[in-house]
Image (cartoon, coloured by chain):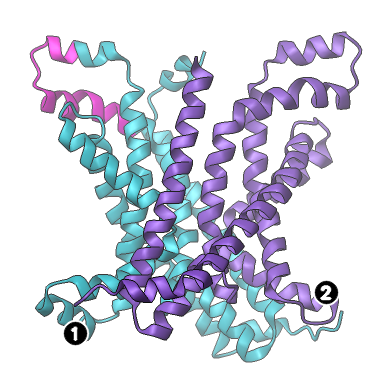
Chain colours: A cyan, B purple
């Protein structure tokens, strides 16, 4: 193997700046997408458990649609196809005047895709509650809405924190797909450094380490969150 | 705007070749990933500390990285290691196999853990060696218990193969994109590709559901 090592290149300008800005874009894409995924995912997850058949059908159709098409293709559809199908005025605004269209396409795409996965976690969290709990609420004269708001959801949310951690990690990793439509996030920047300098080893190692650090930070944060919201003795008791 | 079917019909043979490559990538990565993943799962449950650590490190390492970065890594590394340029197919296959192994090993580990302790102890009491115990007692049951999850992972893998787009391998996704750009028919081609992917993956997940139903019975 013939290779000229040059680790110093990572700390030279402009490459150091590229890595930093790549990291920044990865965080920007992932966190904005997470807001959409979290809110939309909770809504759809709840709809999957309601009595009304039509609402349940819509939610199920959403989940199936977004889970069964590759994310990359969804991204291309959001970026290339959707602006063409919008009403003319809106479409023109998206194509001409919206700043950073590739960023917003990536955010919406990742958000709506991850929402389908979050919804499944929320649904299984709600469904895992014992029927007695629901019946107790109903027998107290609660309406279904009250039952959701004050009994089922508060408990379900605390149960789904651990599985949501892995979704939150996945959104950071999936944000790398945004490079295909021109968002210069972390993976894109490391590739660009490789193309400019032929120091692929150093560039990809830098990206790898930064992704590992992101993972560690997310796991750390979510462990703290989980510890604060966990219901003492609740999950442990159920697995026996 | 008119929806142009003709452009899709004309491109069908080209797209079909792409679809075949997608299936081929899925199959190889699945077999390789499953073999390596099972090995990792056995290491993880072996109780021998260095092996446990290695398996843990491997799995957590690959699960922290985006697949695209792993594909770029091997696209860069494989020619360097061999000393001459090889097609992107081989580096993609290696990247997918090593990457999927991390996920398959977690599935297999869950499967192995689902086999009750009593069975393993019974095997040991009968004088089976560790290898025999795994081969005849634990693994067959683990694989059966894990079948729905394995198929689900295969569907995910099939979708993930679309990422070879970044190294210009002509899978179904890339083939659709090539035609889309060449003919200037992005809407038709991307929507068509989405429908095809959806039908395949949805059929797969229906199959998973019927497997699960059969197992509950």
Name the residue nearer the viewer: A106 or B87: B87
| A108 is higher (above) or lower (below) than B210 | below
Q: Residues within 10 Å of mark 1 (few under 14, many from 20)?
A: few
Distance from the alpha carbon under mark 1 to that under mark 2:
47 Å
Vertical order, A169 against B206 (above or below): below
Which region is colored magenta? Answer: A136-157
Q: Position of residue B16 (x, y in %)?
A: 53, 65
Residue that carries the numbered disc 2 in the rendered image = B81
Describe the element under mark 1 as helix, strand or loop: loop
Q: Nearer the viewer, residue B51 or A66?
A: A66
Q: Quadrant of residue B147?
A: top right
Q: Which residue is mark 1?
A: A97
In the image, residue B93 lies at what x, y percent?
69, 62
Q: Residue at x 40, y 78 (%)?
A: B180
Q: SS of the residue at dot 2?
A: helix
Could one spot residue B91 in this view of the protein?
yes
Count of numbered circles in the view: 2
Q: Is residue B12 placed above or below B23 in the rendered structure?
A: below
Disc 1 with disc 2 on a shared chain: no
Is A45 on the left-hand or right-hand side of B1? Answer: right
Instruction: Decide: few, some or many residues near mark 2? Use Cα within 10 Å; few <14, some 14-19, many ≥20.
Output: few
Tell me the subunit letter for badge 1. A
Instruction: Residue at 85% x, 80% y: name it.
Output: B83
Is residue B66 in view? no
Residue B116 is labelled as none
Q: Residue A62: percent from the left, percent from the top?
A: 28, 47
Task: Report x, y in % for residue B62.
Answer: 64, 55
Q: Mark 1 and mark 2 in contact? Answer it, CB < 8 Å.
A: no
> Which residue is depicted at the point 59% across and 56% down?
B23
């Amino acid at each position: 193997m013939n290779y000229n090592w040059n680790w110093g290149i990572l700390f030279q300008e402009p490459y150091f700046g590229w890595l930093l800005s790549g990291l920044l874009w990865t965080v920007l894409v992932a966190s904005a997408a997470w807001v959409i995924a979290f809110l939309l995912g909770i809504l759809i997850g709840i709809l999957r458990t309601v009595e009304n058949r039509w609402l349940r059908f819509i939610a199920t159709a959403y989940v199936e649609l977004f889970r069964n098409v590759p994310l990359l293709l969804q991204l291309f559809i959001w970026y290339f196809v959707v602006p063409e199908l919008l009403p003319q005025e809106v479409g023109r605004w998206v194509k001409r005047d919206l700043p950073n269209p590739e960023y917003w396409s990536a955010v919406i795409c990742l958000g709506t895709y991850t929402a389908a996965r979050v919804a499944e976690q929320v649904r299984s969290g709600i469904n895992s509650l014992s029927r007695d709990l629901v019946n107790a609420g109903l027998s107290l004269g609660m309406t279904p809405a009250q039952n959701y708001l004050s009994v089922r959801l508060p408990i379900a949310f605390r149960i789904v924190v651990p599985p949501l951690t892995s979704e939150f990690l996945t959104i950071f990793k999936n944000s790398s797909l945004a490079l295909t439509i021109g968002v210069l996030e972390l993976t894109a920047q490391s590739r660009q450094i490789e193309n400019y300098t032929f120091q692929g080893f150093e560039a990809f190692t830098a990206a790898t380490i930064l992704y590992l650090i992101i993972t560690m930070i997310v796991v750390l944060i979510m462990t703290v969150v989980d510890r604060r919201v966990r219901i003492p003795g609740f999950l442990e008791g159920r697995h026996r | 705007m008119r929806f142009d079917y003709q452009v899709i019909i004309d491109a069908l043979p080209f797209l079909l070749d792409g679809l075949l490559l997608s299936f081929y990538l899925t199959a190889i990565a699945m077999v390789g990933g499953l073999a390596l993943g099972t090995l990792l799962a056995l290491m993880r449950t072996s109780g021998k500390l260095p092996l446990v650590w290695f398996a843990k490190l491997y799995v957590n390492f690959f699960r922290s990285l985006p697949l695209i970065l792993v594909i770029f890594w091997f696209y860069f590394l494989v020619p360097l290691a061999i000393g001459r340029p090889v097609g992107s197919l081989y580096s993609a296959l290696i990247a997918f196999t090593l990457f999927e192994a991390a996920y398959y090993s977690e599935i297999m580990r869950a499967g192995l853990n689902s086999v009750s302790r009593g069975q393993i102890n019974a095997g040991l009491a009968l004088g089976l060696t560790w290898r025999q115990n795994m081969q005849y007692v634990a693994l067959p049951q683990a694989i059966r218990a894990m079948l729905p999850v394995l198929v689900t992972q295969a569907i995910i893998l099939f979708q993930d193969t679309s990422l070879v787009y970044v190294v210009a391998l002509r899978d179904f996704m890339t083939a659709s994109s090539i035609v889309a750009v060449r003919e200037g028919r992005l809407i038709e081609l991307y929507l068509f590709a989405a429908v095809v992917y959806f039908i395949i993956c949805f059929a797969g997940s229906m199959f998973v559901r019927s497997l699960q139903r059969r197992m509950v019975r």
